[in-house]
Image (spheres, rainbow, N blue to C red):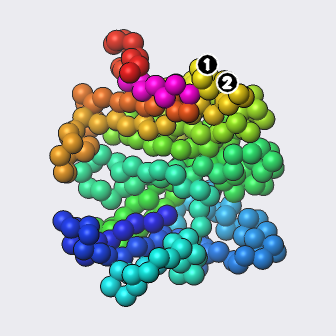
Amino acid sequence: MFRFVPYDKSDLNGGGQLQALRVYVDGTPLVFGGTSAQQAFDDVWSPKQVELHSGASFPTDWVTVHDTTTNTVDFDCNLAARNAGATPFKRPENGVFKPDGSFKTFFFATTGDTNNLSGSVPELAQRGAWGGIFELDLDNKQNLGTVRMIALGDSAHNSFDNLTMGDSGTILATEDRGDTLHDQLNALDSIWAYPLANPASPLRVVAQGRDASASDGGEEDNEPTGIYVSNGGHGRGNGYGKPENLIGARGFFTQQHGDNTIYELSRAGGSANRKR
């Protein structure tokens, strides 16, 4: 999980630091154990991974993995994060700030393993094999914080890809299961609404179908993606709009890999969903 800290936030060309998130479980950082087969096995089956995905809250900070003032050559950011002692997550895909104007509460999704060989093992499902959604709460300087899992994936809700806030108290999450998991579970992708007050009870917003162009040649990966909800504008600092709510917002998502149709979400009782 990376962030870029520019030296001048008004000029991203001016360089800065690339940092990665570090999580402390039981008082010590949860880090990569190594690259050997045994070390990889130990990482996957670590009891700390159970704790990380339990819903408990853990302290965080950031480690610097690259600084443009001291290093301007190409580098492997994942390897640098590993060497710096950052915490590994299971394929982070997308994130969104809570639209309260503070930019201190950030939600991010992990896709997990898009193959049921791991998810069907209860002990690995417990360790996030189906993916999930995390909440990162930062302090005023955004350097220290806490992280907790608010939604652990399962066979019905998994492979989380894109996130947006449907309103100030609801996260919308898209799935990207891929063809393998579509076949294994006999299910296509959905968009889920997770109420922050009760994330254990998500509601299905969209049940994805399959269009003709996605079906030709055996291609089934017709995922909903690019979901975005906002009542703001395109100007700097106005992406979310009114920070205290999303009243009057408009929402869109794309049905990717098939006809690549863009749909607009509408409030229940209003006009039907429109495609573009």
Q: Residue at x 35, y 51 (%)?
A: 97
Toward the bottom, the furthest residue is 70
Residue 206 located left or right of residue 15: right
Pick the front one: 183 or 62: 183
Q: Residue at x 26, y 67 (%)?
A: 12
Q: Is residue 215 above or below residue 239?
A: above
Q: Which residues are magenta?
A: 258-265
Q: Mark 2 falls on what kind of element?
A: helix
The answer to whether residue 191 of the structure is visible from this angle is: no
Q: Amino acid at mark 1?
A: Ala
Name the spot of residue 190 as percent of width and height, x first: 57, 30
The answer to whether residue 220 of the structure is visible from this angle is: yes
Q: Residue at x 69, y 50 (%)?
A: 113
Residue 118 located left or right of residue 259: right
Toward the front, the furthest residue is 217
Q: Which residue position is annotated with label 1?
A: 212
Q: Is residue 91 above or below residue 44?
A: above
Pick the front one: 29 or 196: 29
Q: Residues within 10 Å of mark 2 (few under 14, many from 20)?
A: few
Q: Which residue position is annotated with label 2?
A: 216
Q: Quadrant of the C terminus?
A: top left
Name the spot of residue 155 as percent of width and height, x first: 71, 38
Residue 211 image-quadrant placement: top right
Discs 2, 1 touching: Cβ within 8 Å: yes
